[in-house]
Image: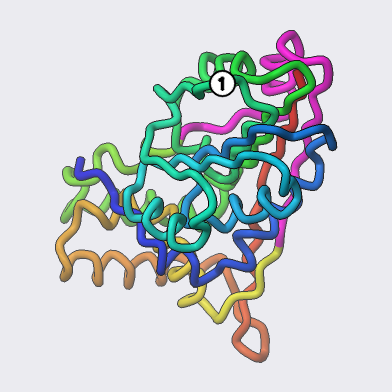
Amino acid sequence: MTKPVWSPEQYLKFEDERTRPASDLLSAVPSRDMKFAVDLGCGPGNSTELISQRFPQAVVQGIDSSAEMIKEAKARLPECDFATADIDSWQPHQNADLLYANAVMQWLPDHVRLFPKLMGFLNTGGSLAIQMPDNLKEPTHAAMREVARDEMWAAKMAKAASSRSQVGDASFYFELLRSHGRRVDIWRTTYHHPLQGLDGIVEWFKGSGLRPYLSVLDADERSLFLEKYKDCLARSYRPLHDGIVLLPFPRIFIVATR
């Protein structure tokens, strides 16, 4: 399957909404003398900017597997250190006081191995802070899978639906991390984003969840896929009198302190 390309412009169409959970996650990180922090999967730098503002004394680094996102992040925050790297194989040059991962770990497999490994890269008292969308069971994603099963492109999309990792529940992550940290804080929040009709939902997920599906289609197929996807969404989301649709978006948060 072609590796989906991240579009900073598409992603940042909803910058305020995407940054809010990033801010909520950071606010739960314990205060300390923060010397070195890393934004794992930093995207276009909106979350890195939050870290720099809260901990201005820290050296802040951002990594992302997308060269397009790193280019955008460097332009946004030239004072920070950014690099293209895969989280799964990345290692810091020194132990960190904060490893921060906003809306990225759902794209990576084997959390049982990865999360404890990341805990090992922390200084004593440092925190691993993670936020992940927990929406694979939501109608938005059920509709993606339904449209992908259409015989006209099902063969192309054999791997698209499995590109996201299954996210465990709070008990799973608490049990996974409790022996690696002195404190593990976990919670789940559902945001309700007001979007401009069904088209707003489509535009939102074109910047994230739809990428693996659309990346294997040509231009005509993408247009037809999105048309069918919108039709499926209409069964579950009803616009209000002014055309606004509230999109429920559940997310799970983890702050584990070593």
Quadrant position of the N terminus in the picture: top left
Q: In screen coordinates, is 8 left or right of 54?
A: left
Residue 176: x and y in percent read 67, 15
**Horizontal and vertical percent position of residue 199:** 46, 77
Tell me the magenta residue range: 165-191
Q: Which residue is drawn at 76% across and 16% down?
A: 124
Vertical arrangement, residue 158 with respect to residue 12, above or below:
above
* Residue 76 left/right relative to 9: right
Is residue 240 left or right of 67 when viewed as pictured? right
Query: Could you classify mark 1 by the number of other residues whose Cα lies within 10 Å: few (under 14), some (14-19), or many (20 or more)?
Result: few
Secondary structure at numbered mark 1: loop
Q: Nearer the viewer, residue 239 or 42?
A: 42
What residue is pinned by disc 1? 94
Quarter of the figure that contains the C terminus:
top right
Task: List x then y, in percent, for residue 137.
Answer: 56, 45
Which of 176/229 is in front? 176
Residue 6: percent from the left, percent from the top? 35, 55
Q: Residue at x 59, y 42 (%)?
A: 60
The structure residue drawn at horizontal position 81% and vertical position 41%, both measured from the top left corner, is 28
User: Across the whole image, how many numbered discs are drawn on residues?
Assistant: 1
Q: Is residue 59 above or below residue 68?
A: above
Hey, what amino acid is under mark 1?
Gln
User: Is 209 covered by the magenta stretch?
Assistant: no
174 inside magenta stretch: yes
Horizontal relation, residue 161 to residue 101: left or right: left
